[in-house]
Image (cartoon, rainbow, N blue to C red):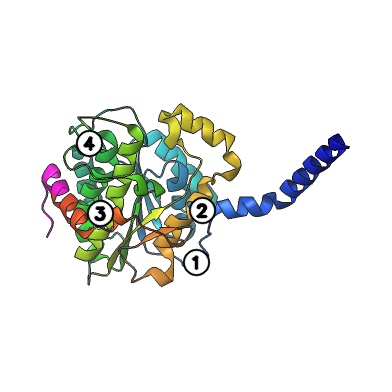
Amino acid sequence: MLILMTFGSIAIVVVLSVALAPYIRRYFAGGVCKSAARLDGKTALITGANTGIGKETARDLARRGARVIIACRDLSKGEAAASQIRAETGSEQVLVRRLDLADNRSIKQFAEDFLKEENRLHILINNAGVMMCPYSHTVDGFEMQFGVNHLGHFLLTHLLLDLLKQSAPARIINVSSLGHNFGRIKFDDLQSERSYEGGLAYCQSKLANVLFTRELAKRLAGTRVTVNSVHPGTVKSELVRHSSLMALSWRIFSFFIKTPWEGAQTNIFCAVAEELENVSGKHFSDCSPAFVAPQGRNEETAKRLWDVSCTLLGVQWD
């Protein structure tokens, strides 16, 4: 009798799981950008758009008529992605330019060339990033995750900001993460020279993205250039290539992990949604406003990080 009840219970669980699976999957897929906005005549720059959510974002913006510049380190991968997007969207306005966010000289050269070639920039999506990599430094001596995820995009935005202002209304989107909740800005050890833990260093860099967004929004008030940060969700991507444990976990729980198309939806939403035209300094996830950890709302920390970043990069913002 007990065995029959056990088999009966298992059967009920299996039937319920199968019946509910589409709804569970839809929940974890998150929000979808429903805007039908066109981007004809607009120029968008997306870092790291040769793969993952960056590539899906580029595909969507190209389909809407935007001139899309894919900025990435590997030109061959970038050209392969651009070729595919051009074929699928029918747009010939998908270009590839080399940009290495781990090298300030590369960033400056990219910006110099971009300003010569392009006379407008309406959407800047700071999407590229590294996650939980072994301890290493950028060309300029910064801890890799802090250097690429925060300082690289900080410098790029600084160099392109005048063009964004001239092209206004314009939007900046900084791709952060839920991981910012676990981050702390270690002003006494920003480069993790005393101690390094890949996960914590990643969270610090993602918190820096949120704080950068907050401080930049204040400084852009009245310019018609907005800046917001996003958490794309847990997405199947190449980000976990440095962590075998994370890669294994994502394979086991793949049912609950977003596809790159699903993960790109909040990027796209923040880039095109009409209702966000005057929204700035906010954080979004699943195409909706999202919670920001207390350390991500600290004005003093945001200002101090801004000043330290300027000093490290040798730049001065107006």
Q: Residue at x 54, y 55 (%)?
A: 30
Q: Residue at x 25, y 63 (%)?
A: 217
Q: Which residues are magenta?
A: 308-318
What kind of element bears circle 1?
loop
Precedes in sequence: disc 1 or disc 4: 1
The reply to whether discs 1 and 2 touch (Cβ–Cβ < 8 Å) is no
The reply to whether discs 2 and 3 touch (Cβ–Cβ < 8 Å) is no
Within 10 Å of the Cα at label 4, are there few (<14), some (14-19), or many (20+) other Cα atoms? Answer: some
Mark 1 = which residue?
35
Mark 2 = which residue?
90
Residue 103: image tag:
4
The answer to whether residue 39 is seen in the rendering is no
- Mark 1 and mark 3: span between their CA atoms? 27 Å
Asked if residue 210 is positioned above or below residue 219 in the image, the reply reads above
Q: Is residue 203 magenta?
A: no
Tell me where residue 182 appears, x and y as whole percent: 35, 45
